[in-house]
Amino acid sequence: MAYIYPAPGVANSEITVSLINAADATNTALSLSGFQDMTINAANDVFTWEQLDSGSKFQIATTSTNSVTMNIVVDQTKFFGTVADASQASDDTAAELGIFGMSKLKSLVEFSIFLGKTDTGGAGKTLSGTGYITGLAPTVSAGEPVWVTPVSISVVGDYTIT
Amino acid sequence: MRTRVLDYLQNQSLGSYRISRELPRSESGDSLFLKNPKNVYCGENQKEITVLLRTLDGLNISAETTTLEVVFANDAKNTPHNYADLVELIVQAKDIYSEGGFNTRESTVTTELVDDLLITRVELQYTKIR
């Protein structure tokens, strides 16, 4: 067995997510942090038809809608970027734009997610691809006065597993 | 925090009640508030830190709750005329830290009878992000 056990706070074992603005020629990555949860979606569409010679329907998988969703604690620098909003350009680095800037500018991002090591200490898998950041909805409440936000990456095309 | 609550209470008009800055310790087997009715005592700060938000990369955001107990006794048969006013003043002490980042401020009043004394305990709780 090789169950995936990401160890929170343990370097090279915990989940990591990095984003690169595809338009950034320097390919500088922004490492996200403060993940509360993460979901990797790979939802195949299914085409269904019926035949007169069968009492059951037939189905075939067609294309998949892929997306990554997570909830994170908002880090001001990583969320809003290191460059002031008015000065942000579409080819800035992911760190300069921040999550919010890349969402606002509709930047195509290259994401890379390390899932964590296995229970036996084996090497972990990295899932990567490209997509667009959507679904930002920072929220805070009196009971939990810490800003948290959902982040979705709508994946363009296939995932790559390495 | 205990000092601030005691200072707040000492600045109030308490009638025949008095504020003691001693801890409500026991002396010769009896708590001071039983030996000295109408003296208001405040216990030491009690702190509890609980996890508010956990994350997959080790970040923990905690809530720190400081609890104080204010306790006093008075005659159960002839309750001083300003008993209710004193209890209300102590309850209002939950708000003396409104500027301190405390997102939750609570107080709970409980009473019990011991012989001919009415024991009143007011628990004050202040919670903030740590």
Image: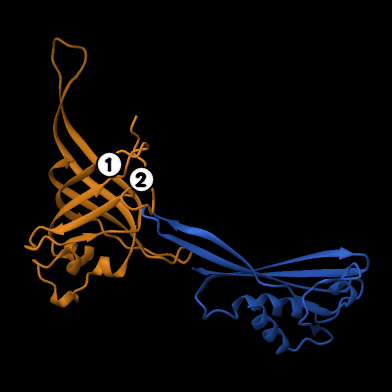
Mark toward the start of the polypeptide (2 vs 1): 2
Where is mark 2, residue-wise? Answer: A6
Q: Number of marks in the image? A: 2
At x 25%, y 59%, the residue is: A31
Mark 2 and mark 1: span between their CA atoms?
9 Å
Neighbours of disc 2 within 10 Å: few (<14), some (14-19), many (20+): many
What subunit carries mark 1?
A: A
Circle 1 sits in a helix, a strand or a loop, which is it?
loop
Where residue B44 appears, x then y in whole percent? 70, 73
Instruction: Classify residue B76 as left or right of residue A61.
Output: right
Tag 2 and tag 1, C-beta contact below 8 Å: yes
Q: The residue under label 1 is which amino acid type?
A: Gly
Where residue B126 appears, x then y in whole percent? 59, 71
- Which residue occupies the extreme top position in the image? A53
- Which residue occupies the extreme front position in the image? A121
Which quadrant holds residue A58?
A: top left
In the rendered image, what is the letter of the chain coloured blue? B
Frontmost residue, A25 versus B115: A25
| Both labels 2 and 1 in a single chain | yes
Frontmost residue, A25 versus A103: A25
Instruction: Classify residue A26 as left or right of residue B32.
Output: left
Where residue A92 appears, x then y in whole percent? 11, 68
Where is mark 1, residue-wise? Answer: A124
Which quadrant holds residue A1?
A: top left
At x 31%, y 59%, the residue is: A33
Neighbours of disc 1 within 10 Å: few (<14), some (14-19), many (20+): many
Chain A colour as displayed: orange
